[in-house]
């Protein structure tokens, strides 16, 4: 391995041999060199050697021609949005191509990299009213991707991610999910210090398909590795007793081993164990080393420990109360004793955080207080003042009265710079105070609500908002603002539709006091897809909201209200929707204009799908997808990826849809779309068509329980009712449609009769099965009247189906014609499964068996092509009833060890997890017959039921 060094062959980064990490180094180099794009996670306790491993790997990677950019997190730093990543990118200038060759997305970093602003495109403007929406995070992530791609092959290293603020953590999450093709991301962290002890990038992180990487956990070193380090530092083979002593004292922690070896190297023969007669604690090691310093060097080291961040010589000297000359002498003494080290051109600090903590913890209380006051005086004289450090040292002195305004000033600075993680940390301390004034409480709570939206994990956001809701003394309108934020996160990120009640409560709390938030809430509620409001009520909300928005001139409220009006027009299949979509600008210099287009196109996709305008939906989805990178609106990707899966299913590409669904769940494991709504519904309907009725029923029940009355659960209600009809249980089917969730009443309140998710045809068929033909006719006429003049091809097909169902008992020819019209309409829309089901109905309506057999050929072929096993078996059963498929009198013995066609069908069902009862229902066989088939299949394949996989499933 070129560039690889280990053991005594290398003097190492800090002087000790790099040993005992050969396997980990190979894993890191393999991922960063050969598996790009890659995400490498290096985990281990403090002092275990994470930084050393990364430093050694970086040397090798640079020798191989990769550009390594490194930044680190720190527990106490001044506000800098996405600080560790920005620190790393500051060194990227010499590698950048000419500005005209950079994508415009790189311009989002220009304000954060002022020294490189001339080498970057102009920063694109933020959309009006988006300051609290988190849009900037996605713009910054896109900009970082662009820069990494521009200088690739590149490796971005971020150390000590356990100290990263939430905005930085989310930026890293966004990068890790979508790395540039020739780049790698390397993160180091201490698991025990991660917030909530959760995963380093949150539960939401999964490597995307095609992204390599490694997860490396460093453990303690053993005796052989310690011997090599001792040999390297001391120059001779160490005695076994020394190795045993060092290993016992250090417990294999490289940091303690190095410190002990440094101490021994200062003794006459390098083996004077009396020098190590201290407890096995780094605190004592540093205390012993500090005790050898003179008073002024000791004061300077103490000042460095209190400062907590690396500092220049002048600041250290001033903080220690020394003049320039004495300060220089004290610093040289501290460096010579290896208590401090140089970290930059004029920057000095401790070799590691444990060393600083060891010195700081050993300071007596009065000494520590005096040091904090002296440091505070130095910092207050700085221009500009380091506000976060000032707040920290003020609090450490116990001066709470002075601390509160200084902490708030630091919050304001951090928020202005976009460093919401630092702001949140400070706000935590402010909100802990028991006697804040109402103004102080309101200001801090509002700021914390904004900062909460920048957390990488929405569950953390929810925890913060819920805690804010419980603050005593919070003014009601402010509580309403926070409740509004809570409801928005619950609905759109957690998928909790019941949170609309939080939004309604928030509306009551802000009305009359906050017209801006009132208008925004009216826009959000105007887009509701649940049964909480009728469409008439929502129209009134939007009208009222526009009145308020005009008064307040709030652009964000205007956007929400216009979008709500558009969504309402989509629900009723307003023919003007197509004109609105066509008129949306696709090219514009103003990114805000394109962002509005992307949002409206995304809404149009869902509306078009529901109405049967599938080609229009596919076009809008593709256009919106193309706009995402140009508009920095990666949040739309989640919804567009889900819509793409539904489109594939409707178009008959079931294999592709199943693959897309699995990829969606892998990519967005924390998103409710993956387990509810339309995605879960289409997956369940596929299972039902393949005969997996129990699996389908359970999944559909879960959708209904989770979504309730919702425009996205109409298909689930229809699918569940059809499963009951398939078992000749129309009463259960009717209960699914009407009790306790009245989906037919919901259609009426929502004016959603044009939604083509099979609900109305299923209800008509159920009523006919219950001998309630009059009600079936009334429902059909109600549907016909409601969709008249609407742009709803799917609803027209469903109206033909309803007519056919009403006529098939009295006028077979008219019923056949109606079903044929439905099949033709579905074919024109591009839904082959829907078309085949309608064609099968037409065939079953014919009274002439020969005509039935002839007509069944087309739908049967379609079912078999799709892999709709149960639908195909139903057709085969009808053919057998008409004498066109006689059973083989020889059984299946003629196939020998090969599977017969029937056995292949059953094998395919077994690979999906179907039970014998499922298979019997799907193929219209007895359970006993299925049991015999299964036994023969397993014998022929020399396998067990549990070992069968899903790989034989037909793909489209």
Image (cartoon, helix red, strand yellow):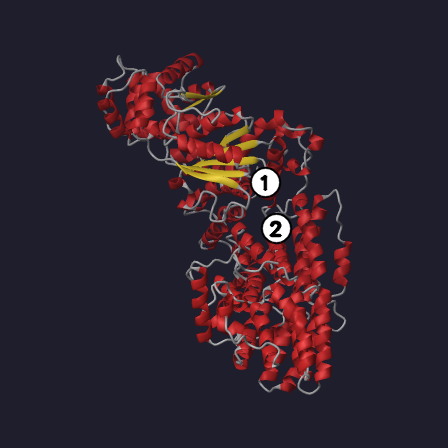
Q: Is residue 303 left or right of residue 241?
A: right
Rendering quarter of residue 433 = top left
**Which of pointers 2 and 1 indicates the residue nearer the eye?**
2
Residue 217 shows up from this direction: yes
Sequence-earlier tag: 2 or 1:
1
Circle count: 2
Rendering quarter of residue 682 = bottom right
Q: Is residue 231 left or right of residue 800?
A: left
Distance from Cα at disc 2 to Cα at disc 1? 14 Å
Q: Nearer the viewer, residue 145 or 299?
A: 145
Q: At 46% from the left edge and 41% from the top edge, which residue is drawn? A: 425
Q: Nearer the viewer, residue 798 or 481?
A: 798
Residue 292 shows up from this direction: no
Q: Position of residue 737 (x, y in %)?
A: 56, 75
Q: Position of residue 744 (x, y in %)?
A: 61, 75
Q: Which residue in the structure is indicated by mark 1?
A: 141
Q: Within 10 angstroms of label 2, few (less than 14), some, or many (20 or more) residues?
A: some
Callout 2 touching callout 1 (CB < 8 Å): no
Q: At 63% from the left edge and 56% from the top edge, which residue is drawn? A: 644
Q: Please tell me whether residue 844 is drawn above or below residue 542 in the rendered image.
A: below
Secondary structure beneath dot 2 equals: helix
Q: Please tell me whether residue 151 is drawn above or below residue 561 in the rendered image.
A: above
Secondary structure beneath dot 1 equals: helix
Q: Position of residue 386 (x, y in %)?
A: 50, 30
Q: Position of residue 472 (x, y in %)?
A: 44, 54
Quadrant of the image for the C terminus? bottom right
Q: At 70% from the left edge and 76% from the top edge, which residue is drawn? A: 819
Q: Within 10 angstroms of label 1, few (less than 14), some, or many (20 or more) residues?
A: many
What is the number of the mark on residue 890?
Answer: none
Q: Which residue in the structure is indicated by mark 2?
A: 637
């Amino acid at each position: 391995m070129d560039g690889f060094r280990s053991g005594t062959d290398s003097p190492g980064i800090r002087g000790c041999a790099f040993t005992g990490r050969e396997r980990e180094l190979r894993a890191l180099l393999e991922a960063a060199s050969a598996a790009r794009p890659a995400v490498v996670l290096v985990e281990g306790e403090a002092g275990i050697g994470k930084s050393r491993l990364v430093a050694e790997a970086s040397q090798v990677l640079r020798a191989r021609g990769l550009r390594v950019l490194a930044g680190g997190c720190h527990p106490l730093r001044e506000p800098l949005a996405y600080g560790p990543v920005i620190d790393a990118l500051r060194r990227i200038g010499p590698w950048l191509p000419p500005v005209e060759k950079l994508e415009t997305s790189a311009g989002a970093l220009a304000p954060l990299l002022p020294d490189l602003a001339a080498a970057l495109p102009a920063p694109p403007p933020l959309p009006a009213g988006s300051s609290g929406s988190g849009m900037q995070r996605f713009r910054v992530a896109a900009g970082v991707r662009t820069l990494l791609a521009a200088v690739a092959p590149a490796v971005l290293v971020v150390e000590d991610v356990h100290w990263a603020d939430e905005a930085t953590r989310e930026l890293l999450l966004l990068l890790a999910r979508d790395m540039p093709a020739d780049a790698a991301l390397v993160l180091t962290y201490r698991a025990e210090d991660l917030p909530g002890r959760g995963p380093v990038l949150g539960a939401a992180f999964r490597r995307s398909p095609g992204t390599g990487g490694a997860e490396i956990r460093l453990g303690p070193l053993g005796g052989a590795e310690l011997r090599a380090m001792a040999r390297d530092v001391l120059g001779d083979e160490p005695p076994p007793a020394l190795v045993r002593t060092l290993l016992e004292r250090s417990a294999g922690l490289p940091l303690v081993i190095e410190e002990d070896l440094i101490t021994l190297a200062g003794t006459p023969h390098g083996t004077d164990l009396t020098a190590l007669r201290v407890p096995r604690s780094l605190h004592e090691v540093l205390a012993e080393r500090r005790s050898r310093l003179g008073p002024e060097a000791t004061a300077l080291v103490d000042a460095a420990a209190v400062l907590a961040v690396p500092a220049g010589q002048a600041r250290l000297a001033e903080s220690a109360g020394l003049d320039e000359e004495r300060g220089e002498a004290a610093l040289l003494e501290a460096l010579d004793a290896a208590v401090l080290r140089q970290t930059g051109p004029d920057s000095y600090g401790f070799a590691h955080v444990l060393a600083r903590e060891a010195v700081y913890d050993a300071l007596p209380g009065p000494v520590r207080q005096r040091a904090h006051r002296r440091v505070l005086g130095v910092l207050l004289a700085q221009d500009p003042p380091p506000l976060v450090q000032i707040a920290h040292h003020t609090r450490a002195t116990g001066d709470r009265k002075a601390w509160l305004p200084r902490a708030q000033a630091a919050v304001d600075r951090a928020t202005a710079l976009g460093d919401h993680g630092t702001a949140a940390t400070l706000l935590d301390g402010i909100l802990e105070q028991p006697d804040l004034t109402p103004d102080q409480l309101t200001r801090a709570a509002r700021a914390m609500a904004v900062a909460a939206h920048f957390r990488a994990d929405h569950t953390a956001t929810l925890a913060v908002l819920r805690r804010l809701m419980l603050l005593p003394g919070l003014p009601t309108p402010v509580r309403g603002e926070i409740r509004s934020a809570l409801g928005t996160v619950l609905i759109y990120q957690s998928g909790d539709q019941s949170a609309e009640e939080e939004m309604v409560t928030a509306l009551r709390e802000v009305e009359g006091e906050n017209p801006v938030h009132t208008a925004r809430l009216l826009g959000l509620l105007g887009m509701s897809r649940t049964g909480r409001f009728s469409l008439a009520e929502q129209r009134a909300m939007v009208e009222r909201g526009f009145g308020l928005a005009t008064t307040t001139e709030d652009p964000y409220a205007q956007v929400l209200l216009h979008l709500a009006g558009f969504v309402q027009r989509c629900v009723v299949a307003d023919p003007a929707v197509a004109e609105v979509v066509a008129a949306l600008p696709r090219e514009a210099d103003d990114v805000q204009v394109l962002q509005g287009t992307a949002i409206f196109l995304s809404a149009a996709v869902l509306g078009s799908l529901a109405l049967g305008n599938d080609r229009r939906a596919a076009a809008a989805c593709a256009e919106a997808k193309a706009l995402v990178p140009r508009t920095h609106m990666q949040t739309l990707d989640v919804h567009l990826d889900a819509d793409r899966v539904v489109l594939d299913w409707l178009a008959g590409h079931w294999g592709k849809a199943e693959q897309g669904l699995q990829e969606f769940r892998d990519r967005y494991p924390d998103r409710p779309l993956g387990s509810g709504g339309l995605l879960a519904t289409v997956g369940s309907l596929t299972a039902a068509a393949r005969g997996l009725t129990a699996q389908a029923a359970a999944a559909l029940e879960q959708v209904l329980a989770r979504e309730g009355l919702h425009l996205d659960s109409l298909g689930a209600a229809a699918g569940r009712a059809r499963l009951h009809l398939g078992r000749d249980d129309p009463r259960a089917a009717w209960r699914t449609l009407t009790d306790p969730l009245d989906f037919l009443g919901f259609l009426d309140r929502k004016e959603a009769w044009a939604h083509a998710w099979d609900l109305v045809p299923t209800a008509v068929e159920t009523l006919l099965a219950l001998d309630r033909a009059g009600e079936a006719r009334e429902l059909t006429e109600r549907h016909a009247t409601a969709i008249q003049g609407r742009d709803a091809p799917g609803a027209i097909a469903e109206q033909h189906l309803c007519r056919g169902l009403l006529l098939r008992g009295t006028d077979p020819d008219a019923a056949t014609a109606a079903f044929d019209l439905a099949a033709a309409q579905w074919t024109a829309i591009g839904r082959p499964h829907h078309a085949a089901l309608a064609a099968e109905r037409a065939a079953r309506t014919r009274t002439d068996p020969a005509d039935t057999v002839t007509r069944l050929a087309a739908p049967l072929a379609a079912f078999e092509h799709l892999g709709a096993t149960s639908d195909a078996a139903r057709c085969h059963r009808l053919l057998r009833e008409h004498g066109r498929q006689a059973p083989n009198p020889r059984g299946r013995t003629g196939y020998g060890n090969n599977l017969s066609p029937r056995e292949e069908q059953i094998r395919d069902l077994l690979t999906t997890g179907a039970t014998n009862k499922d298979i019997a229902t799907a193929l219209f066989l007895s359970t006993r017959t299925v049991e015999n088939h299964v036994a023969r299949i397993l014998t022929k394949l020399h396998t067990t039921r549990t070992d069968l996989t899903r790989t034989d499933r037909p793909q489209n």
